[in-house]
Image (tube, rainbow, N blue to C red):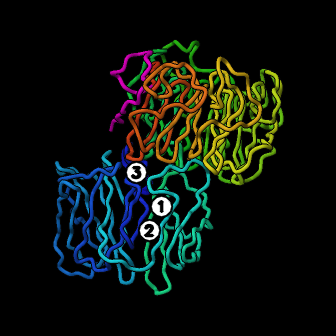
Amino acid sequence: MNTNRKIFGKPLIVVLCLAVFSFCEKKETDPAALALLGFTLNLSMVSGTLTDGAGNPIPNASLEIAAQTSSKAEGLSKSLSTTTDTGSWQLSLGTGSYEILVKDVNGKTLGSFKLSSSENLEPSIEDISHLTDTIFLVSLANQKEVGSKFEILSPKDGSIIKTYDLALNIKTSDSLTCHVLQNKTEKENITVGKGEVTSSVSMKPLLGANKIQVHCTNEAGVSAKKTVLTYFGNRISAGGSHSGYVVNGSLYTWGRNNFGQLGTGTSTGDLTNPKITKLSTISNVVSIGFNQNSSLAITEDGSVWTWGANAVGQLGMGNIGDLQAAATDAGPRNPPRKVPGITNAVMGVYGFDHVLVLKKDGTVVSFGSNSVGQLGNGTGGAGTYSANPVNVIGLPTDIIQVIGGSDHSAALTKSGDVYVWGKDQYGNLGDGVLGTSTEVNGTPKKVGSLSGIIHIATGRDHIIALKNDGTVYAWGLAASGQLGIGGTGSPAPVPTPTLVTGLYNAVSVWANGTQSFAILGDGTVKGWGANSSGNLGTGQTTPAKLYTPGDIVVGIKDIQYFGCGALHNFAILKSGVLYGWGWNFKGSIGRSDLQETWAATTPIFLTIPE
């Protein structure tokens, strides 16, 4: 197993519980991240706090020195510190490098972190490893101000990267020379002037864990090193009524399995499957993409794996059809299989019955249904499909995200442009024109009225786009209020990107079916669109349609990542925990104690088994 992925531990861990390091002065930081605050170079006494992912103190936990390397303090014996009710701790150490074990009140090892220091280098915490699903965060107390003051504004520790782009933003109060490393490989050397905010370093994230180290030295020669851990890959996904979650390379699935979309290689027909189950049929998974009755996974080597329904070649295996005569028949189903001909994949998504795959070089391939040109290869027509991957043509080479709707597809460029192709019956192309149900648009077309877009999402027949100023635009099918621009009854389609009402601080957008969501800067989520299944998470199933962003999803906060099914949804919190809500059809939410075909109108905590 890749050692880089071990830092993500169990399901509550993969979100990475670290925060931006600040060595020089004590200040308010994100409570869901691990903060290393400034302290003296003398490590004779190191003190700090231990908290959970939400910033709450962890009392009666122990920090034990498990290993000692290159230490200048000879004869240092094994030391043990127990946290107080406020989570504070204190260790007597000499200058050197140490592995600190973190144990809970029962003596169970939760994981470890490495604490190191040398002359003229501020101490740093790195190589955090979690062994259980209990999040712990470590902060060191500020004892004395020293030089090299800087802050990593983005990416945030513990974040999950949403597009194939990783920009490093540094803010400093000194003039610094900095070395930037990604997973121990030097990426760039930069100079940052006093008071500047720089994003001059733009990297492509690696699949899975990304460890970004920034080592800066000021004009006086004093150095500081800060480490940010982030993750690239879609860890939670949902389809028509099935769901999946990635934990430390393992894939867990639950819900409907009539087409074998859970990936177990067998099915009991169309019975309910609420139990969250770890798959033995695939490993080393870093990202998934589910929709309707099909599933996709990308493994750490860049391979694409598919399973589920295959009526129009949407598994990419060169054929069509399913193993069973009828979806209700019990028996064998195709397990996850590697799609031939695709390497270096970094992102994969399902539309209704077609697939888009973004590759490392910025190109896009597709397979499955092509009835209205949704494969983007310049062809298409009623009944046409490709059971083998084909190249999407006419796209720029700086694609950082792909999405798929019912019969349309879209891509986002690093420069902030959106391209759409395929179905245009509801104005899906965003060009101000309503197409027909049979019109073929087999070549990507740029949405001319948009710029500065940083994240996109799509439902059945609508698209939403987040602009770099925090506003959101939407277009396409509007009958359920899914565009968020107001209206009553069943509004007509809107073929031109239109400003979503009342959203000005969004940081990401999400959609599926006829529902839409935006995560806001404060970690809350607002939804709009169809709500009769309780899928907007407001605690109510009425009104059945919300035409503008409504109440926030109740009962949870600090949401950092989202997964949208057709009528059910999931949220990963900064603390690492997972919640689900909406229509519990065939066990799609993942709790055996929930009533079948029942609307869970508020988020419900989910436990991922060992």
> What is the total number of numbered labels drawn onto the structure image?
3
Q: Earlier in the sequence, mark 1 or mark 2?
A: 1
List x then y, in percent, for residue 397.
74, 53
Q: CA distance from mark 2 to mark 3?
A: 19 Å
Crowd rating for badge 1 (residues with CA inside 10 Å; few <14, some 14–19, many 20+)? many
Q: Is residue 99 left or right of residue 407?
A: left
List x then y, in percent, for residue 51.
29, 54
Q: Main secondary structure of the magenta part?
A: loop
Give the residue drawn at x 37%, y 46%: 575
Three-letter code for the amino acid on which mark 2 is drawn: Lys
Q: Nearer the viewer, residue 535 or 64?
A: 535
* 525 drawn magenta: no
Tell me the quarter of the image containing the C terminus: top left
Badge number at residue 226: 2
Q: CA distance from mark 1 to mark 2?
A: 10 Å
Q: Nearer the viewer, residue 414 or 316?
A: 414
> Is 276 placed above or below 234 here?
above
Query: Which secondary structure, mark 3?
Result: helix
Tell which tag, 1 or 2, sits nearer the viewer.
Answer: 2
Query: Which secondary structure, mark 1?
Result: strand
Q: Which residues are magenta?
A: 589-610
| Residue occupied by mark 3 | 8
Give the residue drawn at x 36%, y 36%: 608
Crowd rating for badge 2 (residues with CA inside 10 Å; few <14, some 14–19, many 20+)? many
List x then y, in percent, for residue 204.
61, 58
Badge number at residue 211: 1
> Is 87 placed above or below 577 here?
below
Q: Nearer the viewer, residue 500 or 281?
A: 500
Three-letter code for the amino acid on which mark 3 is drawn: Phe
Q: Earlier in the sequence, mark 2 or mark 3?
A: 3
